[in-house]
Image (cartoon, grey):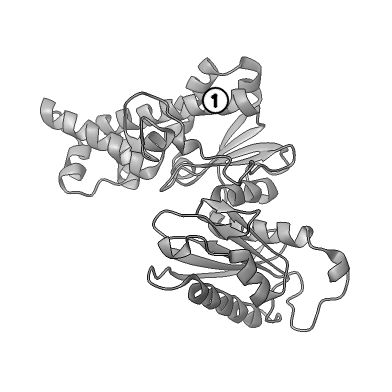
Amino acid sequence: MASESPGVSERLLCGLDIGGTKIGVAIGREDGALLAATSFPTDAGAHPEQLLAEALDRWRQLAVSLGGGDRPAAVGAACPGPVSTSLGRFLDPPNMPAWHGFPLMEWLAKRCAAPSAMMNDADASVLAEVNWGAARGARCAVFLTMSTGMGAGLYLGGDVYEGASSLAGEIGHIRLRDDGPVGFGKRGSVEGYLSGPGMVQVAQTEARGCIQTGEPSVLVELFQADTLTPEALCAAAVAGDAASRRVIERCATELGRLLALLVDLLNPEVIVLGTIGAAHPELFIPRAREVMMQEAIPHSARIVRIEPSPLSQRGHLAALAVALRAWERRDVSSG
């Protein structure tokens, strides 16, 4: 390998976890070691260039504090979709209008002079899982976000699969039922049942039913106090609240139907659950697996593993996985 230029932090990667509420900044090595990380709020009124400049400044401060140079060996960004990796820019991420059309790769090329790459957060997450997490070593894996939205990162045949225009894996838009909670602008959709806001919709419907029948439930208390969240729902289910457990079973059943679709279509080795599914695998995986085994091709269903993500700092590691990919695919002749 060509020697590093002066000031370059040898093999220290810069990961940018860009989100609508905060921007995470991570410094790590290619072995997945997260050396340091920080974050700061995403100011909705600030221009992306201002926020990114602050992110790089924070990375440099971390690198210098670790005894490294002030330039990263490679930069990776995990971004809210939709993005176009071929164009190197954001498309129109919801709730982030200032970022619509922003040419991230062009900006990084001017500011960093280092190999750089961007991916949507689901694709970045499946890459992190394959490198260091529950899908380590797999050649065919799926990551399900189960967060504010519901998307999938697809790793097929040994590489991330993005589709013709970087929009593969938008499974939240798939309709599971003709009616039901709304997600991705569609009733009865995957996102309606399996995103955090979607689960809250299912729980609200159950709480209204409890009020009508007079059934006492923690859900009713949470609903009336306007404190019904995915975390509160799961906590109530763990504590044994009957109505909460019915909500979880309903959502887990729809998760099982989704798993069956993915298994029949992709025949993956492993499907990894993020965020809500990772926090409470005992609530979701048994029922989801039961439904999947009933509905999927038997041989494919038998070999697939359904795993919670073990990566506690997944956002940072997802961004670092993208940086590592940029490093590995750099043009050595230009180094």
Q: Residue at x 11, y 28 (%)?
A: 212
* Relative height, residue 135 to residue 72 (above, below): above
Picture quadrant where residue 219 is located: top left
CA neighbours of label 1 inside 10 A, class few (<14), some (14 to 19), many (20+): some
Q: Position of residue 322 (x, y in %)?
A: 66, 57
Q: Position of residue 84 (x, y in %)?
A: 59, 53
Picture quadrant where residue 41 is located: bottom left
Q: Position of residue 331 (x, y in %)?
A: 82, 63
Instruction: Describe residue 75's horizontal placement relative to residue 309 as left or right.
Output: right
51 or 292: nearer the viewer: 51
Query: Can residue 234 be seen in the rendering of this structure?
Result: no
Return the residue at label 1: 261
Q: Position of residue 153 (x, y in %)?
A: 58, 43
Instruction: Describe residue 219's horizontal placement relative to residue 19 as left or right.
Output: left
Q: Residue at x 52, y 71 (%)?
A: 38
Q: Residue at x 33, y 36 (%)?
A: 182
Count of marks overlaid on the render: 1
* Relative height, residue 313 to residue 300 (above, below): below
The local secondary structure at tag 1 comes to helix
Image quadrant holding the N terminus, namely bottom right
Which amino acid type corresponds to the residue marked 1 in the rendered image? Leu
Instruction: Describe residue 212's horizontal placement relative to residue 118 as left or right.
Output: left
Query: Can residue 166 be seen in the rendering of this structure?
Result: yes
Image quadrant holding the C terminus, namely bottom right
